[in-house]
């Protein structure tokens, strides 16, 4: 399973870029998974519901199964272990690619992990890129919608004008490369 990180600043277009990539690759027949890192407190569970009650009673893992979907609720332990568990699930599911949105501190400095970077402006992009290990495939998101000529060393690609180029660069990097480094 190949990994691709979409890393950027708050409100810079990370989710829009990840959604675009997922949609385009899925449309071409690739099996895609996604990890969304959320910085604030969040739960899909609702107080008083059966799954909430199971968690409150001490269940470390709660799985809800309906005719339409399966939801797994697991309380976090070590963030690195949790990401590796999620990646292992993706491997077992036979996914071609896992898109990791966020987790900048966890995956940003991983050499060999391909990244798409988003920012709102050149100042944010410059500050963000100092802490990122290669490879950076492209810059996209809000900054790319404003200008595609930033003098950055990788392509700056607006999804709406050059999204097809972004997808080709991603496919070239992920599926035509001999070796892919994964988060460990």
Image (cartoon, rainbow, N blue to C red):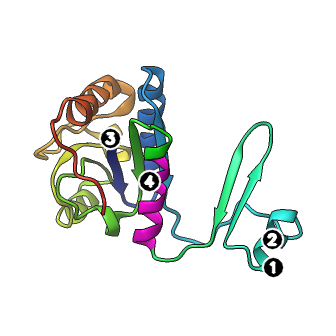
Of labels 2 and 3, earlier in sequence is 2
Q: Is mark 1 on a helix, strand or loop?
A: helix
Residue to which mark 1 is pinned: 57
Of labels 3 and 1, earlier in sequence is 1
Determine if residue 13 is in view. Answer: no
Q: In which quarter of the image is the N terminus?
A: top left
Residue drawn 17% across and 42% down? 179
Q: In which quarter of the image is the C terminus?
A: bottom left
Check if residue 83 falls in the magenta segment.
yes
Of labels 2 and 4, earlier in sequence is 2
Q: What element carries label 4?
A: helix
Position of 142 relative to 103 (above/below): above
**Label 1 neighbour load within 10 Å: few <14, some 14-19, many 20+:** few
Q: Marks 2 and 3: which is nearer the front?
A: 2
Residue to which mark 4 is pinned: 88
Residue drawn 34% across and 50% down? 5
Q: Is mark 3 on a helix, strand or loop?
A: helix
Q: Give the range drawn in magenta.
A: 79-90
Residue 139 place in picture, x, y as percent: 26, 44
Residue 17 place in picture, x, y as percent: 41, 41
Residue to which mark 3 is pinned: 146
């Amino acid at each position: 399973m190949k990994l691709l990180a979409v890393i950027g600043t708050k409100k810079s277009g990370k989710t829009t870029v990840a959604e675009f990539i997922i949609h385009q690759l899925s449309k071409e027949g690739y099996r895609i998974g996604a990890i969304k890192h959320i910085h604030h407190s969040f739960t899909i569970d609702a107080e008083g519901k059966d799954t909430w009650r199971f968690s409150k009673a001490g269940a470390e893992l709660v799985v809800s199964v309906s005719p339409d979907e399966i939801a797994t609720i697991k309380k976090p332990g070590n963030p690195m272990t949790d990401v590796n568990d999620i990646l292992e699930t993706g491997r077992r599911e036979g996914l071609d690619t896992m898109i990791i949105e966020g987790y900048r501190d966890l995956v940003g400095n991983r050499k060999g992990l391909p990244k798409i970077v988003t920012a709102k402006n050149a100042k944010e992009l410059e500050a963000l890129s100092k802490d990122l290990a290669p490879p950076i495939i492209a810059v996209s998101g809000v900054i790319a919608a404003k200008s595609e000529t930033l003098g950055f060393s990788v392509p700056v690609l607006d999804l709406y004008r050059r999204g097809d180029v972004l997808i080709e660069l991603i496919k070239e990097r992920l599926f035509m490369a001999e070796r892919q480094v994964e988060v460990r």
